[in-house]
Amino acid sequence: MGKSIFRFWLVNVLISVALFILYRLVIAETDTAATGFLETIIVILDIIVNLGFSTIYLFAVILCSLLFFLNHIEKIRRNKGLSFLTFSGIPAVCLILLIIYILVGFYRYHMVLDPLKMLLLFSVIYLASTILEFILFRKIIEKQQADPKVQQ
């Protein structure tokens, strides 16, 4: 069982790192042309905001991937709801909070910041990957419960 959980954790870490690198590349490719002093200051502030969002994203995916190891506890592993929370609980909560934050900003200021749009996109992709991993993990668990001699 430990090997299966470790494999799923490793896949999640690889997906997380790939998404983080892709997120940083997208941030690096944004147009930052500035002609005046004020525009230069705004570009610098935009870079700082993007770095902050990418750091938050990195810490969130690290925390989410570490929660996979809670599936070593048999009570959590056998309960589909608790097992789902170890895979996708924090990403789902973060996504809901991000959507609420974007909606409040949109209705209050009638605009959405581009870094928030990118963060939302990458958060949805990460949540979809954790849900897919959970479905595959449950198939392996059910197979092992049906035939205890099968060790993945």
Image (cartoon, grey):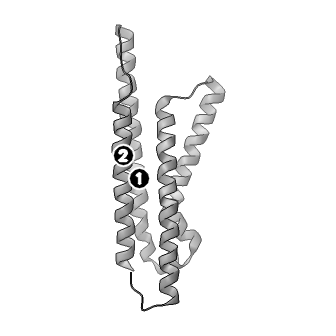
Residue for badge 2:
20
Q: How many marks?
A: 2
Tell me which amino acid carries mark 2.
Phe
Q: In this picture, is 9 found above or below 120? A: below
| Position of the N terminus by quadrant | bottom left
Image position, residue 89 (x, y; %):
53, 59
Image position, residue 90 (x, y; %):
50, 56
Q: Which structural element holds mark 1?
A: helix
- Mark toward the viewer: 2 or 1: 2
Q: CA gap, disc 2 to disc 1?
A: 9 Å
Tell me which amino acid carries mark 1.
Val
The disc at residue 126 is: none
Question: Residue at point 39% right, 32% down?
Answer: 50
Quadrant in the picture for residue 21: top left
Question: Residue at point 51% right, 76% down?
Answer: 139
The disc at residue 61 is: 1
Of 5 and 85, which appears nearest the observer? Answer: 5
Relative side of 123 to 54, left or right: right
Question: Residue at point 53% right, 81% down?
Answer: 142
Image position, residue 54 (x, y; %):
38, 40
